[in-house]
Image (cartoon, rainbow, N blue to C red):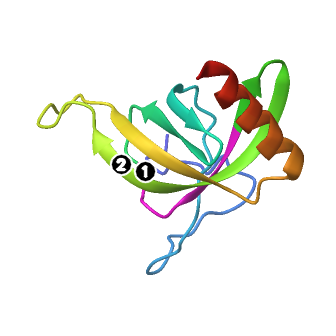
Amino acid sequence: MSDVKQERRAAPRVAAQGNLPGQLEIDLDTNVFQLSPGGMMVELGMPVDVGSEHAFNLNIDGEDLDLIGVVRNIEPSMPGDPTTSYHIGIQFCDLTDEQQAILTRFVESKL
């Protein structure tokens, strides 16, 4: 019996040399704490980079809104606690007139 491990992959792997940038999109459920026609405050269990752009789906009064937003600020919910979650401020980008109207109508109905 040989001590050499047999490769089981169909395609070979190589080590990335240097910095090979990439992006991982993760589908996470989150709590929306605040909502305005221009953005929202959400809570996540991990930090994200200020300035990073993300896709979001909100269901408002039965309307599914597929939105793009940019992270504008982030704060730990309990500073100093290593298990803290994060409050993340998102600014919506490139809203359609219909999306803007749905968001505005929803927010105004809660005032």
Q: Residues within 10 Å of mark 1 (few under 14, many from 20)?
A: some
SS for callout 2? strand
Q: Which mark is residue 74?
A: 2
Q: How many numbered circles does the render carry?
A: 2
Tell me, yes or no, whether the highlighted magenta stretch contains residue 55.
yes
Identify which amino acid the numbered label 2 is placed on.
Ile
Identify which amino acid the numbered label 1 is placed on.
Val
Q: Where residue 50 sits in the image (x, y, percent)?
A: 42, 60
Q: Which mark is residue 48?
A: 1
Q: Where residue 86 sits in the image (x, y, percent)?
A: 34, 37
The answer to whether 69 appears left or right of 10 in the picture is left
Judging depth in this view, the residue of 71 and 47 nearest the camera is 71
Q: Is residue 109 above or below residue 107?
A: above
The answer to whether 65 appears left or right of 7 in the picture is right
Q: State which region is magenta.
A: 48-56
Q: Residues within 10 Å of mark 2 (few under 14, many from 20)?
A: some
**Within the image, what quadrant is residue 27 found in?**
top right
Q: Where residue 64 sits in the image (x, y, percent)?
A: 83, 29
Identify the residue at image location x=57%, y=65%: 22
Judging depth in this view, the residue of 106 and 23 nearest the camera is 106
Tell me, yes or no, whether the highlighted magenta stretch contains residue 1.
no
**Within the image, what quadrant is residue 75 found in?**
top left
Judging depth in this view, the residue of 30 and 46 nearest the camera is 30
Tag 1 near tag 2, CB within 8 Å: yes
Q: Is residue 109 above or below residue 17?
A: above
Identify the residue at image location x=58%, y=25%: 29
Q: Earlier in the sequence, mark 1 or mark 2?
A: 1
SS for callout 1? loop
Identify the residue at image location x=39%, y=31%: 45
Task: Tell me the CA gap for discs 1 and 2.
Answer: 8 Å
